[in-house]
Image (spheres, coloured by chain):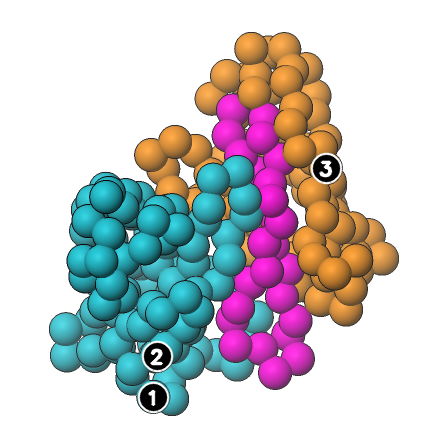
């Protein structure tokens, strides 16, 4: 597609349930990023993929959070046993490493609400 | 390690007045610097970027920013605010390494434009 696509756009779940958030990056972009945006917290880095590997996953808040990327394209962020503090907007971004200048292209985000 | 500090979580200006949003950075290596804008219920969109070329950078919608190494600043300005500029603005930094790497964002400044 033309831009970064994320699904679902909105997800309401009960505390303790697992959720999966999907990101489809811009075609040809080898780098993919997940950020979390909470009220008053700005954008918090979660994990970065180069191809299918994750050189930097230092931002994952706990072992309940995991992410994978397959085929150098689609990525899934999984949150197990969700807690109310996981409520946030999860943003995905991609960039091209060829002649890279660091610009990220963002999706519109997945808003997660944990009741 | 890199970081950015945005002074003022909320800024209010009158339509037609000067917009000044402040950003100071900390970086141990030459940085790339960015300003992104986020309109309600949308993802982030690049306004402008500094990648070690001209220190005065012009972006979209009449915005510009000046890289001042001596002050470690990258403040965003626009001579005359328009109602459509109301949004949240994020300053971000990444290392100038020539390869993709994560952006570190500030906590954002919400710009309000009044009549």
The answer as to whether the residues below labels 2 and 1 share one chain is yes
The answer as to whether the residues below labels 3 and 2 share one chain is no
- Residue that carries the numbered disc 1 in the rendered image: B54
Say what secondary structure mark 1 lies in. Answer: loop
Is residue A102 covered in magenta? yes
Residue A35: % across, % down: 53, 45
Residue A7: % across, % down: 72, 37
Which residue occupies the foreground of this view, A25 or A86?
Answer: A25
The answer to whether residue B104 is seen in the rendering is no
Residue lying farthest right? A71
The answer to whether residue B91 is seen in the rendering is yes
Residue lying farthest left? B71
Which residue occupies the foreground of this view, A5 or A77?
Answer: A5
- Residue that carries the numbered disc 2 in the rendered image: B57
Chain given the colour cyan: B
Numbered range of the magenta stretch? A87-112
Marks 3 and 2, how far apart in space?
Answer: 34 Å
Residue lying farthest bottom? B53
Residue A48's quadrant in the figure? Answer: bottom right
Tell me: residue A81, above or below residue B33: above
Residue at 34%, 88% (x, y): give it. Answer: B54
Where the N terminus of chain B falls, by quadrant?
bottom left
Which residue occupies the foreground of this view, B55 or A61?
Answer: B55
Residue A7's label in the rendered image is 3
Give yes or no for contact between labels 3 and 1 (Cβ–Cβ under 8 Å): no
Tell me: residue B67, above or below residue B75: below
Residue A6: % across, % down: 70, 43
Where the C terminus of chain B falls, by quadrant?
top left
């Amino acid at each position: 597609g033309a831009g970064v696509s994320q699904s679902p756009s909105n997800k309401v779940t009960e505390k303790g349930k697992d959720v999966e958030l999907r990101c489809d990056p811009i075609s040809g972009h080898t780098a993919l990023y997940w950020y979390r945006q909470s009220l008053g917290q700005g954008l918090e880095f979660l994990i970065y993929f180069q191809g299918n590997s994750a050189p930097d996953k230092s931002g994952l808040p706990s072992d309940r959070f995991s992410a994978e990327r397959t085929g150098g394209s689609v990525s899934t962020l999984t949150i197990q046993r969700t807690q109310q503090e996981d409520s946030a907007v999860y943003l995905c971004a991609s960039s091209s490493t060829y002649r890279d200048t660091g610009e990220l292209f963002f999706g519109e985000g997945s808003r997660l609400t944990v009741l | 390690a890199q970081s950015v500090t945005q002074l003022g979580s909320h800024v209010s200006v009158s339509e037609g007045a000067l917009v000044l949003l402040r950003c100071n950075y900390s970086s141990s290596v030459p940085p790339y610097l960015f300003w992104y804008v986020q309109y309600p219920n949308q993802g982030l969109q690049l306004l402008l970027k500094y990648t070690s070329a001209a220190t005065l950078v012009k972006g979209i919608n009449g915005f510009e920013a000046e890289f001042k190494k001596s002050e470690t600043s990258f403040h965003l300005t626009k001579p005359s605010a328009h109602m459509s500029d109301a949004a949240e603005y994020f300053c971000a930094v990444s290392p100038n390494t020539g390869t993709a790497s994560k952006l570190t964002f500030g906590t954002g400044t919400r710009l309000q434009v009044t009549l």
